[in-house]
Amino acid sequence: QHIFGLWEEAGVPGENPRMHRENMQTPCRKIPGKPGREPGTFLLQGEIANHYATVQPYFPSYYLIPSISEDTARDAFVLFASSKCCYSSAPAKDGVITDMEAFNTYRYRLETFTESRSTEWSHEPYSGQTVDAYAQPPPGPWDIPAQAPNFFLNGKKTIKVPYTSSVKSCHSCVGMGRQPCKDCAGAGNKVCWVCNGSGYRHGDDRCHHCSGRGRENCSRCHGQGSKQCDVCRGKQQLLVYINLTVKWTNNSDDYVVEQSSGLRVDNLSKVSGKELFRDSQYMVYPVMGFPDPSVVNAAQRLINDHQARFSQTSRILQQRQTIELIPVTKVTYTWKGNSHLYFVYGNEFKVNADNYPATCCCTIL
């Protein structure tokens, strides 16, 4: 029997060690400003409401839509057309702009930076390393210190759990240090590929490749019939221990207010907007008083969703919420007597023109 304390009995290397439920439970962090709560507990529903009842940022009743000039819209359109190998730039350069209409589009984003921990057995060839499994009980998975990277940046770190190292015979070679060669099935030689095992090439001519033996030494094991074990590297024993893998993940969700411009919402995922609001702390408060009620509802829904999704399986380290105003301009223009439209959107002045009137099929010879 192996004494791994909280980690329980060792299994086959590569399997997850079985841990007691109470020791694997993710510790929660107490919300600042709420005395009398023990660490590792959640706030009750009423306490959450009171905790949120703090000073909220001031939002104006509306935001002015940043307008772009006709020259800016045209330059963006020309750049878009020139980036397409099969698009003529004539509509972008010669088209006459007849109307430009701007649209309010808000994007709310919630980011929850979490830390999760998992364990698995690992091993390496034993060459006299320290064996500490019997020294004292190992620490729990959440008792091992691990320095997190900067907030909202994904990261991963593997830590050898102290007091879990022990020595066992190599399971791959059964402690022999060598394994039968698969190419020659342990014989050390194979049928000669030149004479097919006959020992002769033509009539009575002895095969020079195998000297008439009909067999040749195995090139992989050099005629030994076995090779060094790849797992223990000939050491016959393995140092077996538990590895703790710590992952830091930035979990992000967006909500984009539906707008009536006709531009598909998924296009907006590739652009940025004017930042109206930014809030970063351990647990953010739902936005209140924003002029668009759908943003307020989305903030409440996503915050509750992230708390439910991540607090039971990981540790929440930090949250960040932002609200952006993404400018979208719908441009109507005429070219060769027909009316067409395109969209200019985002701080990057990206262009979407699904029905560009001058495209051609390119043939590469």
Image: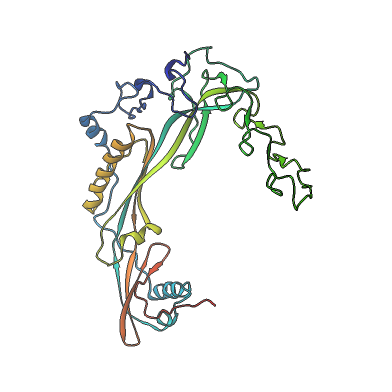
Q: Is residue 218 above or below residue 66?
A: above
**Image location (x, y in percent) of residue 42:** 29, 28
Q: Is residue 272 visible?
A: no
Instruction: Please provide percent x and percent y for residue 217.
Output: 72, 39
Q: Residue 21, relative to residue 272: is it above or below?
A: above
User: Seen from this angle, which residue lies furthest front?
Assistant: 203
Direction from residue 263 to residue 8 in the image, left or right: right
**Residue 296 or residue 128, whichever sits in front:** 128
The answer to whether 6 is drawn above or below residue 86 in the figure is above
Q: Relative to residue 249, is residue 308 drawn left or right? A: left
Look at 48% across and 72% down and name the residue there: 83
Q: Is residue 188 left or right of residue 14?
A: right
**Along the viewing direction, whichever of 159 and 75 lies nearer the viewer:** 159
Q: Vertically, is 282 above or below 109?
A: above
Q: How many marks?
A: 0
Q: Quadrant of residue 32?
A: top left
Please name the residue shown 41% across and 62% down the image.
Answer: 347
Q: Residue at x 34, y 59 (%)?
A: 266
Quadrant in which the C terminus is drawn: bottom right
**Residue 22, how many percent across, how many down?**
34, 20
On the image, the x and y values in percent for residue 112 come to 37, 40
Residue 212 placement, left or right of 270: right
- Name the quadrant containing residue 38: top left
Rendered image coloring scheme: rainbow
Q: Is residue 174 visible?
A: yes
**Which residue is the extreme one toward the bottom?**
337
